[in-house]
Image (cartoon, rainbow, N blue to C red):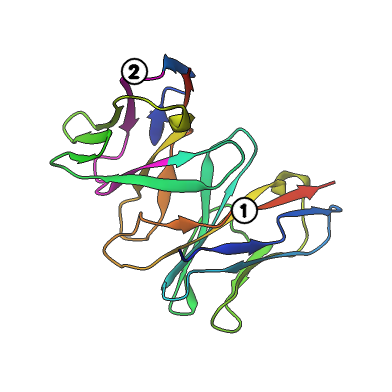
Amino acid sequence: EPEVTQTPSHQVTQMGQEVILRCVPISNHLYFYWYRQILGQKVEFLVSFYNNEISEKSEIFDDQFSVERPDGSNFTLKIRSTKLEDSAMYFCASGGRASNTGELFFGEGSRLTVL
Amino acid sequence: RKEVEQDPGPFNVPEGATVAFNCTYSNSASQSFFWYRQDCRKEPKLLMSVYSSGNEDGRFTAQLNRASQYISLLIRDSKLSDSATYLCVLEAPGNNRKLIWGLGTSLAVNP
């Protein structure tokens, strides 16, 4: 069964460092997303990406965040200068059909710990 | 009123029990609704979409009440493997492909 894969599974970094989280969405999917979940809290939308550009982003997704799809398969989330409050599980998701925007497939997540 | 509100539980039920969860939402313009399940420290997985007419998938039944702005999930004949957190999710109005998530309802099915 096709799946979304994410690396690394866990990253520990110092405050102020840059972090890149990587995702390989399901190959024939067209819509890509990053969500995050702070421990014990709800899942929060960060950004959606379609046709090589951001289609929507949340208030959380400020200038410190960026996304790229550099080679047609990988989808990356970069945090330029991490803050303590960026510590969370980051989930990549992809979706295939325009008519089913909520039917997403999630990766297992990348746990980011900022010290 | 929160965008999506759920009773966090936990719900502790014996195997074989029927259990129901409700979820309320604040924005009447929301069009699409979903139930996801999330196991502890794992990724969310789509359980089912929720249609206006109600829909059933095996032991799971989802209902939508637009007038009262709530959706429900009924699980019949609970299994141990149903133990998880059930997340009520809706698509934000405006066709921006953004999902809004509830905090989840925790279910523990006991032998």
* Residue A63 in sight from this viewpoint: no
Residue extending furthest front? B111
- Residue A18 screen position, x and y as percent: 79, 64
Q: Which residues are magenta?
A: B15-36
Q: How many marks?
A: 2
Q: Is residue A40 found left or right of B111 in the rendered image?
A: right
Q: Which residue is mark 1?
A: A109
Residues under labels 2 and 1: Cα distance? Answer: 32 Å
The quarter of the picture where the N terminus of chain A appears is bottom left
Residue drawn at the location 30% of the way across and 40% of the way down: B27
- Residue A24 screen position, x and y as percent: 57, 70
* Residue B70 in sight from this viewpoint: yes
- Label 2 marks a residue whose chain is B
Residue B17: assigned label: 2
Q: Secondary structure at mark 2?
A: loop
- Label 1 marks a residue whose chain is A
- Residue A36 screen position, x and y as percent: 59, 49
